[in-house]
Amino acid sequence: YLQSKLRANLPIVDFVSLIYGAALLHLAAEQDIFAMQPAGWQANVAARLELFRRPDGGYAKTDEGQSSSTYHTFLVVLCLQLLEQPVPQPERIVDFVNSRHRDEGGFVEIGPMRRGGTNPTAAAVALLQIFGALDEPRREETIDFLAELQNDEGGLLANSRIPIADLLSSFTGFLTLVDLQARDEIEVDRLRRFVQSVEQPDGGFFAAAWDTAADVEYTFYGLGCLALLA
């Protein structure tokens, strides 16, 4: 299945999943899906990804996209790391990420947005950490921003305008707090109760209280939360 996707023109989010899936398969079963690829294919992929670069230093969702995306910039950097390729001009990425910071302490996905969100903040902080560019004031602002997004349910909101917590935001926000050594800045027991409340008897997880069907993606986030909480 993974080898069949090598011939597909995948979006960057799916390509990262392909590379990561291949790494897991190699680790678990010593199978290399790239064994038949020509020499230097990693550098060719890196050159292809550079076509997504925009003048502000970030990367767009596609090579035809007009606007850089905080999340897709993170995915490109992650992909380059998995391929063991250098990241071109990392200082431009740091400048781009800092331009997406907002006064309340979070980061936005696209430039015109004024209110930071949990998920772009997680991507932005991860990028700053990768390049050793997260200073203490910004770390403290990020911690305060994420802690404020824990609602009465116990989970984290995607942003302050959304009233219902979800597993994706809870996972990325809590993972970021753990990475920032600020795990206890939120009420951990309440987060655990939220995660357990959307866990289903047959093994899957709902995305949030409004959901009616478990799926693979949110089961991943649910298990991720439980692992961090353990």
Image (spheres, rainbow, N blue to C red):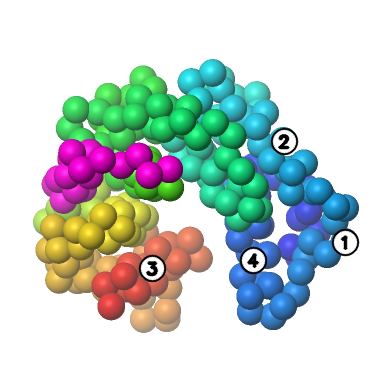
Quadrant placement of the N terminus: bottom right
| Residue hosting label 2 | 48
Give the residue type that dot 3 points to.
Gly
Please report the residue visible at 76 percent of the width from the left and 69 percent of the height from the top: 32
Which SS class for mark 3? Answer: helix
Q: In the rendering, which numbered label is found on residue 36?
A: 1
The amino acid sitting under disc 2 is: Arg
Q: Measure the alpha-carbon separation of dots 4 and 3.
A: 19 Å
Instruction: Tell which circle, 3 or 2, labels the residue nearer the N-terminal end.
Output: 2
Q: Check disc 2: other Cα within 10 Å, few if <14, some if 14-19, many if 20+.
A: few
Give x and y (percent) for residue 27: 63, 75
**Callout 1 amino acid:** Met
Of the two numbered discs 1 and 2 on the same chain, state the one appearing first in sequence: 1
Position of the C terminus, as image quadrant, is bottom left
For marks 4 and 1, give the CA distance. 15 Å
For the residues marked 3 and 1, what is the alpha-carbon distance in whole angstroms?
33 Å
- What residue sits 61% from the left and 70% below the top? 24
Whether residue 145 appears in magenta in the rendering, the answer is yes
Q: Name the residue that disc number 3 marks.
A: 224
Position of 171 with respect to 35 (left or right) is left
| Label 3, label 2: how far apart the Cα atoms are | 31 Å
Residue located 29% across and 30% down the image: 101
Contact (Cβ within 8 Å) of mark 4 with mark 2:
no
Question: Where does residue 161 sit, x and y in percent of width and height?
Answer: 21, 36
Kind of element beneath mark 2: helix
Number of the front mark, 3 or 2: 2
Mark earlier in primary sequence (4, 1): 4
Range shown magenta = 131-149
The residues tagged by marks 1 and 2 sit, at their Cα atoms, a distance apart of 19 Å
Dot 1: what SS?
A: loop
Classify 10 Å Cα crowding around label 4: few (below 14), some (14-19), many (20 and above).
Answer: some
